[in-house]
């Protein structure tokens, strides 16, 4: 009997809170619904504010080969090294012409740099060159591995001299 007297206040407290929890359930559903609607409205507003990607344009004449060799700098001051027909050109964000290019020369001008890509324009045609890490790294030449003498560790082996 003593255990029941001890537990009675706890049982009464749980019963009180259970009643409030059941009564608050419809209010919680309303709050959840309001949050869901608010989130949907915020997403719609954000989607309308962000510019939609431009539709794919007709591919420019493939006479020139473009490759983005490197892209470095900080936001607003990016520098891109674009290889045009084997010749590296240095473009800085905020400047249309490549470094060292004359304004009268028919060459690619920088439109924008974004998301690892450089958009260039030559005449009316726009071309995009995106960074490809595997293409930027040169492949090392294959060299035959000299056989080690028995008992010689790789760090003790003589270093081969470069050929003239």
Image (cartoon, rainbow, N blue to C red):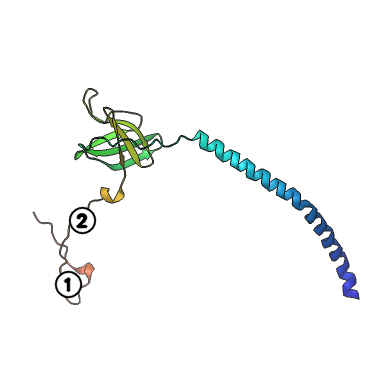
Q: Nearer the viewer, mark 2 or mark 1?
A: 2
Q: Nearer the viewer, residue 66 or 22?
A: 22
Furthest-top residue in this view: 104
Left or right: 24 in relation to 99: right
Which residue is disc 2 drawn over? Answer: 140
Q: Alpha-carbon distance for marks 2 and 1?
A: 22 Å
Residue 148 numbered tag: 1
Residue 32 pos. (x, y %): 68, 48
Q: Nearer the viewer, residue 120 or 25?
A: 25
Furthest-left residue in this view: 164
Task: Say which element carries label 2.
Answer: loop
Task: Say which element carries label 1.
Answer: loop
Residue 72 pos. (x, y %): 34, 41
Of the 4 image quadrants, the one containing the N terminus is: bottom right
Residue 67 pos. (x, y %): 26, 42
Q: Residue at x 28, y 51 (%)?
A: 134
- Relative vertical location of residue 132 with respect to residue 146 in this rendering, above or below: above
Furthest-front residue in this view: 58
Using the rendered view, name the quadrant where residue 13 is placed.
bottom right
Q: Residue at x 86, y 63 (%)?
A: 12
- Relative vertical location of residue 111 with respect to residue 23 in this rendering, above or below: above
Residue 77 pos. (x, y %): 37, 34
Using the rendered view, name the quadrant where residue 129 is placed.
top left
Q: Residue at x 32, y 33 (%)?
A: 92
- Which of the two discs, 2 and 1, labels the residue nearer the N terminus? 2
Q: Residue at x 65, y 44 (%)?
A: 35
């Amino acid at each position: 009997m003593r255990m029941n007297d001890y537990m009675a206040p706890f049982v009464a407290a749980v019963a009180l809170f259970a009643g409030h929890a059941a009564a608050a359930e419809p209010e919680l559903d309303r709050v959840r619904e309001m949050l869901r609607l608010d989130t949907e409205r915020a997403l719609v507003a954000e989607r309308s504010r962000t510019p939609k990607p431009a539709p794919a344009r007709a591919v420019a004449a493939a006479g020139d080969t473009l490759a983005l060799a490197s892209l470095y700098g900080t936001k607003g001051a990016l520098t891109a090294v674009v290889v045009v027909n084997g010749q590296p050109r240095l473009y800085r964000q905020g400047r249309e012409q490549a470094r060292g290019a004359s304004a009268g020369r028919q060459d690619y001008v920088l439109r924008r740099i974004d998301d690892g890509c450089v958009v260039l324009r030559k005449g009316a045609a726009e071309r995009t060159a995106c960074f490809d890490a595997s293409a930027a790294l040169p492949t090392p030449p294959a060299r035959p591995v000299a056989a080690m003498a028995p008992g010689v560790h790789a760090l003790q082996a003589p270093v081969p001299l470069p050929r003239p």
